Image: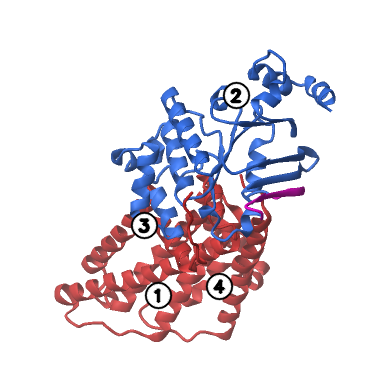
Amino acid sequence: MSTVHVMNRPAGRLFTAELRKLVDTRAGTWFAYGLVGLAALMCVAMVTTGGAEHLSFQNMWGMLNLPMSYLLPILAIMLVTTEWTQHTTAVTFALEPRRERVVAAKLATSLALTVAVLAVTALFAALATVAAVSLRTGTPGWRLDGDIVRNLTLLQFARILEGFAFAVVIRTTAVAIVAFLAVPTAWTLLGSLVPWAGTHLRPWIDMAAAQQPFQNGEAPFESAHPLATSSWAHLAVSLGLWVVVPLVVGVRKLLSADLT
Amino acid sequence: MIDVRDLTKRYRKKLVLDQVTFGCRPGTVTGFLGPNGAGKSTVLRILASLTAATSGTATVHGCRYRDLPEPATRVGLMLDTSALHRGRTGRETLAVTALQLGLTADRIGEMLDTVGLSTAESRRRIGDYSLGMRQRLGLAHALLGRPDVLMLDEPANGLDPAGIRWLRGFLRGYAAEGGTVLLSSHQLTEIEAVADRFVIISGGRIVADGSRADLLGSSAASLEDVYLYLTSAGRRDTYLEGAA
């Protein structure tokens, strides 16, 4: 028998493998193409039909990120749940029995994906701005507020963390996605049924409501608004409730679960 | 190399494994036999640290699988051939594991050749594979990290007669080079010719452990007779008492 000299595996390898697993399946490949295609289509639509006053770089960048804030979390959910639906947990956790490392690698992959999407949408927005200047407005709208960058980044990270946490605790693709999409609607419903809860409770427990101030209302990303301290508090509490709690519960369960 | 001692597993009130004890030495092929549901897969999953034992120990190379540094380079596992992502190609499945183990692309090609999967087949998605092709890929996957212990769950399942003959030759060669093989099956005929030792489990208990000669003794019965006798309900206990 040949022997292999093994050194401790660099943590990066697990991360690279997870990144690759994200896009190397049929579903993953099409999802990636779909995201790029959608961004391109949106750029064309904005430049050709959008009001000239909305064709600034930062507004278009923000608009491109809105649908991504629904699609990216679904990708993060699938990164986790497909291990169970495709029965690959035995292989994954036999290759790396330290299960917390696998979860960490998947989380790092999700966050890297978010950064990549922010960068790619910025590139598309830049191209759209160039096109808008030559085709429509004539005046370049290249202003970029630090607050907008921060809000967008926060928004995307919050959304993907929320999807990831749902997936770790639920572990079934369809149920996790439905829960991720339906929970905000449930709060809206609660708010209209019980007005007191809608006013006093919802800002704290509804992720979507807590994220609303970071999107600045109607023309979300044209200029930054100052944020109230309460907005930060709402975001922190709702993140704790919908990200930290399910993540802790889900990871604890996973570490001791019998895998089949 | 593989050491299972007093292994007990209880799911709520159901006793799935009851004081299971056996071992496997280098250079041998151990056939782990028993009807479906007898507890074979549970033993293998505990050996791979995927499932926790209620009590008892299961070690490979002297320690728990999870405590081995880079376990896939010490122990090759094939637990369930449906445990491969159907949307990924065969080659890509090997590539992701090779990436984690720090192996080069040469090793992937080498293993595909070993198990007899062509380049064209390796580029197809696993969802389009036959059961036999998945078994071959699963074996290539288990062998990727050059382990000297192999644990295979139902490896002959779905192989055609030529495939079974090939598997037999491969595993004999692997053991001859000093490797340790543990392979489970619910069909004696599939592994009768490849194993040099048989561990028979029934209802979560080991009912026999030994070579063909040990199991047959001086009787004129076939190994199949013994296997069926041992694993049929009701007769097991009388046999065990007789043996004791």
Amino acid at circle 2 = Leu
Q: Mark 3 points at which residue?
A: B104
Residue B192 vertical placement versus B103 (above, below): above
Characterize the local packing of mark 1: few (<14), some (14-19) or many (20 or more) Cα atoms within 10 angstroms. many
Residue A210: which numbered mark, if any? 4
Amino acid at circle 4 = Ala
Characterize the local packing of mark 3: few (<14), some (14-19) or many (20 or more) Cα atoms within 10 angstroms. few
Residue A115 vertical placement versus B41 (above, below): below
Chain bearing mark 4: A
User: How many marks overall?
Assistant: 4
The answer to the question of whether label 1 and label 3 lie on touching residues, with beta carbons closer than 8 A, is no
Q: Mark 1 points at which residue?
A: A220
CA–CA distance in space, label 3 to label 4: 48 Å
Residue B160: which numbered mark, if any? none
Residue B188: which numbered mark, if any? 2
Disc 3, SS: loop
Q: Which of marks 1 and 3 is in front?
A: 3
Disc 1, SS: loop
Q: Residue B153 in the image: x percent, y percent?
A: 57, 37
Amino acid at circle 1 = Pro
CA–CA distance in space, label 1 to label 2: 69 Å
Amino acid at circle 3 = Thr
The chain painted red is: A
The numbered mark, 4 or 1, whose residue comes first in the sequence reads: 4
Residue A227 relative to residue A186: left or right: left
Marks 3 and 4 share the same chain: no
Q: Which of marks 2 and 4 is in front?
A: 2
Find the magenta span and give its range: B52-63
Marks 1 and 3 share the same chain: no
Looking at the figure, which quarter contains the C terminus of chain A? top right
